[in-house]
Image (cartoon, rainbow, N blue to C red):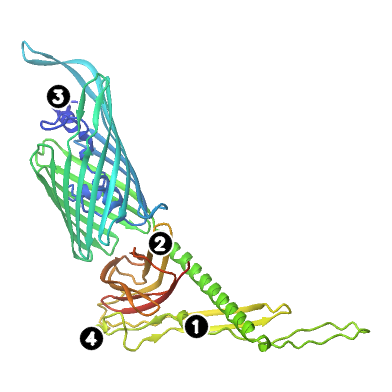
Amino acid sequence: MSLQRTILSALCLGALALGSTAGSFLENPISVRSLAMGRVGAALAEGSAAYLNPGLIKLQEAQSYQIMQGQVLSEVNYFAFNYALNHGPFFDLGLGFSFLNSGVDGIQETTYDHGTGTAAYTGNEFGYAGRAYVFTTGLQALKNLYVGANLKVIQEIMHEQNSSGVGLDLGAVWQKDKLTLGLSILNLVQPQVTWSEGWTENLNTRVLIGLAYKILTNWTIYSDIEQNGERPVYYGLGTEFSLFDIVALRGGWNPDQFTLGTGLRWKNFSIDYAYLLNEDQSIGASHFIAIAYLLDNTQELSRLEQEERARQKLLDAIEAEKQRQELELTASPAAVTPDVTTPDAASAEIVTVSAEIHPLPVQKELFMETVTLDRSSPENAVLDPVEPVLTTLKTVSAATVNAAGETQIIQEIIEDEEVSVNIGDDTGETAGQDYEISMVSARYYYQSGRLQSNIYLDNTGSQPTEVHVDFRLLNSANEVLLEERNITANINAQKTKVLRIPYDAPLPAGVYYLEAASRSPVVSKYQKEQFVKNN
């Protein structure tokens, strides 16, 4: 390794002119998408970007695993692992973990002669290693606001010295429609890196402000501004263009580098590459590559919730029929007159008890309403359709009363048939674009007093689509308790998007209705479901 390379490696790893020299290996993002777009990342909805802004942990898709390998200046090696989960089992928290390891070997030891002002190699070599362990958590604080925190542990080894420190980051993200804004304060609690020789350093507090704006469904621009200690303000610009939700083309710029990159996604796997060309071409270029696996469990959760919903409806119907039969028996004991044949004392005839079979009533609240809306008529793009078309609901049931007067349910079959219509023309411009509201459900958390409504949107087409959703929560008197308008959801092809809408006001026991209307460039749909809250 030449002396120039030795100096450059040291500069890259910690011997920076301004601010703290410790922990400098942390300044590169571990997101290869971010690196390919000018190192922007404070508003990038990806699990590994939570390393720069922990509020992003709630915006990434489902559950992801990612490993990254890179090389800076053809000398410094980077390796990172990231795990991210957007909906954890505890209080719906987003959870994540990142591990970063950076190092360089073969640095030649030199001695410096103060008298002559010359340096000479000793013939010995040493290495440098920096490691970071980052634990991330985040939550949805308000409708469009997400917040999070990073707890990180830092370790560094240089020559015969080693150091360690602990720090805290905070971040927030605001997202609405096509705009995402991010604010992150890294090292808010500054890690105090204590070296084995006894001297300490504090890492600089870094403030990042990020912006992402979706120009088209498949084209987004990004921008970051950063203040790092006493250094000059740093900024970056980047863009990403996606082709058929499979191939991504990326580019960016910052005061130090021009960046390029690409990505390939197939089913649950993705691979990303970034190329960073320094303005000083004599230094060399940097390369990063990442492989990720996305565990998309939303469809499985949708199926399980549909099964649970059907089971609960059946149980509710059975319970309602039992209560009705009990009320009839209490009010009029002769309402059911059994036909009893008393056996002769000398005979062995069996006593038979029979009763009229009462079919279960078809309850109005079991209907699922589906209506098609003409997007050319603005007055129809509301939650209340003028002429709703009810879904076909068939109930085949039977009940009998045994000798003890107990109602026995024989069977019940409920079939739903959904109606939809394409509004686009036959020119092929809307080919491959379709979606459906697969389910509207709710769950009440008694511990926190929150009603969590869920709207499941399935993109059944072959192209990404953008859907705008209106939602209302009504009580049994059809009074509106909550109304949310124009919620934008971008759904990838053959994927499911879940919109989660919280309601934190007191909710007495009773019957409530969940009402959802949605519209895309080619079709609009409406659905209404019942929710029963018990004491």
Total marks shown come to 4
Residue under pointer 4: 377
The amino acid at mark 3 is Leu
For residue 298, the mark is: 2
The front one of 353 and 115 is 353
Mark 4–mark 2 contact, CB under 8 Å?
Answer: no
Where is residue 109 drawn, in percent x and y? 20, 18
The amino acid at mark 2 is Thr
Where is 487 relative to 277, above or below?
below
Q: Earlier in the sequence, mark 4 or mark 2?
A: 2
Q: Distance of mark 3 from mark 1, alpha carbons?
A: 84 Å
For residue 3, the mark is: 3
Q: Distance of mark 3 from mark 2, alpha carbons?
A: 54 Å
x 37%, y 78%: residue: 527
Q: Earlier in the sequence, mark 4 or mark 3?
A: 3
Indicate the secondary structure of the residue bearing disc 2.
helix
x 90%, y 86%: residue: 344
Indicate the secondary structure of the residue bearing disc 1.
loop
Q: Quadrant of residue 218?
A: bottom left
Circle 1 crowding by C-alpha within 10 Å: few under 14, some 14–19, many from 20: few
Where is residue 454 drawn, in percent x and y? 38, 67
Where is residue 494 drawn, in percent x and y? 36, 67
Residue under pointer 1: 363
In-image side of 520 versus 353 (left or right)? left
Indicate the secondary structure of the residue bearing disc 3.
helix
Mark 3–mark 2 contact, CB under 8 Å?
Answer: no
